[in-house]
Image: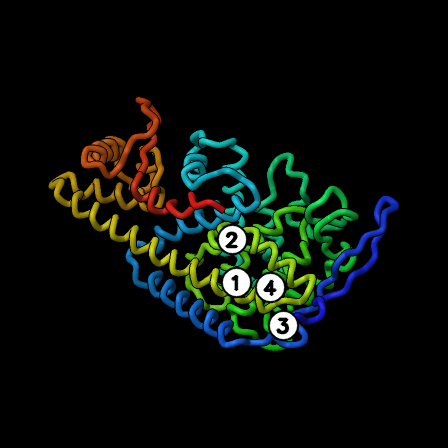
């Protein structure tokens, strides 16, 4: 169904050039969404897949360790959509002060994306609902770096545009700065079930488009908007932990992702977007479950091999456990994580290297870096897909 464009255009003049900026209507869409049998099926399937993922989170013995890696996976993918080249291994190396295989700024940018999600979770678990205060805190974590110049943590006070060299030839022009506060106030009310509750997954789909359309910050809107999907599903009780990485699906179908966001703005075609979103969430949740199970199988197989080490097994198992949280690490980091002595950690690493569980990646005598290589490869397998 094509409904009227969900908003209005206003004429703005900058540097003597008039252009049209789009001001979205408040959510929910009017007229109401049309639920075809296929659309209902896709949302039902997405909810089932999220339920399976949440069950994995509850049952896996290493769920807390996986969360550390899954959060980083989403940050890498979301940043890749914006053009960074950093891989998961690059991020993990950067986090232990080692040189990544890409420019340091790319890895630093992904690290800030991780910090933004962690800031949001911390504030949410401290009692703050999903609101603009929480999102500006996340934006500050994302953009706060020397020379950033993108007003971290502040709603924009000037015009932005997407594509093109100026608003007059842009692909899309978000609302003028003076109406952004009103747009955000309406979005915040909808997020918090005013005027009425909306099922969480539908809400997540609608809010993502609305946030991207308002484009409340000078930069970083895409990354904050994608992190918002996962945070909101946690806030609304659909997921216990942010184990979902929907940016994998958006990256794989990047052109269609941007096209459908635009179709909502141009033609009010919410239904096509909702269909794409539900399929993306279902696919992402199924991928997360498959990755979690594959990692659990790997960890269990390696644990069995380590148990055969005899007296050395207890210390080696402690190092193996620490490597599940930080699968690329220095021996010093592992000493800190395990609280074992440096000598014990180094002996354990030698055992783990001998049986092929870890690999030393620097060929140095001091400050050596060890990789739980198969774990990293399993975790990062989908990240190498084109998109």
Residue drawn 31% across the image and 42% down it: 323
Counting residues from the start of the chain, the first of labels 1 and 3 encountered is 3
Secondary element under disc 1, as helix, strand or loop, is helix
Secondary element under disc 4, as helix, strand or loop, is helix
Residue 297 placement (x, y as % from top left): 25, 52
Marks 2/4 in contact by CB < 8 Å: the verdict is no
Marks 1/2 in contact by CB < 8 Å: the verdict is yes
Residue drawn 74% across the image and 59% down it: 22
Gap in Å between the C-alphas at discs 1 and 2?
A: 10 Å
Gap in Å between the C-alphas at discs 4 and 1?
A: 15 Å
- The local crowd at label 2, few if under 14, some if 14 to 19, many if 20 or more residues have their Cα within 10 Å, is some
- The local crowd at label 3, few if under 14, some if 14 to 19, many if 20 or more residues have their Cα within 10 Å, is few
Gap in Å between the C-alphas at discs 2 and 4?
A: 20 Å
Q: Which mark is residue 200?
A: none
Counting residues from the start of the chain, the first of labels 4 and 1 encountered is 4
Closer to us: 76 or 256: 256
């Amino acid at each position: 169904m094509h409904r009227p464009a969900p908003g209005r255009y206003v004429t703005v003049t900058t540097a003597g050039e008039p252009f049209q900026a789009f001001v979205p209507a408040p959510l929910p869409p009017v007229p109401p969404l049309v639920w075809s049998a296929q659309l209902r099926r896709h949302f039902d399937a997405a909810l089932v897949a999220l339920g399976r993922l949440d069950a994995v989170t509850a049952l896996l013995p290493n769920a807390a360790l996986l969360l550390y890696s899954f959060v980083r996976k989403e940050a890498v993918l979301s940043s890749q959509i914006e053009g960074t080249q950093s891989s998961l291994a690059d991020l993990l190396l950067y986090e232990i002060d080692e040189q990544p295989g890409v420019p340091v700024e790319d890895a630093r940018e992904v690290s800030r994306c991780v910090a933004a999600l962690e800031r949001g979770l911390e504030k949410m678990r401290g009692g703050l609902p999903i609101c603009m205060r929480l999102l500006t805190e996340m934006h500050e974590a994302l953009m706060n770096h020397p020379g950033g110049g993108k007003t971290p943590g502040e709603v924009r006070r000037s015009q932005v545009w997407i594509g093109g060299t100026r608003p007059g030839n842009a692909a899309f022009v978000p609302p003028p700065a003076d109406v952004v506060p009103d747009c955000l106030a309406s979005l915040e009310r909808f997020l918090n079930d005013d005027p009425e509750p909306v099922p969480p997954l539908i809400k997540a789909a609608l809010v993502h488009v609305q946030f991207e359309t308002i484009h409340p910050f000078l930069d970083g809107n895409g990354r904050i908007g994608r992190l918002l999907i996962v945070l909101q599903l946690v806030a609304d009780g659909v997921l216990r932990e942010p184990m979902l990485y929907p940016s994998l699906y958006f990256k794989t179908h990047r052109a269609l992702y941007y096209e459908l966001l635009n179709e909502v703005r141009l033609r009010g075609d919410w239904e096509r977007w909702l269909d794409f979103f539900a399929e993306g969430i279902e696919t992402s949740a199924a991928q997360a479950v498959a990755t979690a199970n594959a990692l659990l199988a790997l960890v269990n197989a390696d644990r069995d091999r380590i148990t055969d080490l005899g007296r050395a097994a207890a210390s080696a198992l402690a190092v193996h456990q620490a490597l599940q949280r930080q699968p690329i690490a220095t021996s010093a980091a592992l000493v800190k994580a395990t609280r074992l002595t440096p000598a014990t950690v180094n002996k354990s690493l030698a055992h783990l290297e001998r049986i092929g569980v870890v690999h030393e990646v620097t060929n140095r005598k001091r400050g050596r870096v060890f990789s739980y290589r198969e774990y990293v490869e399993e975790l990062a397998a989908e990240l190498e897909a084109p998109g």
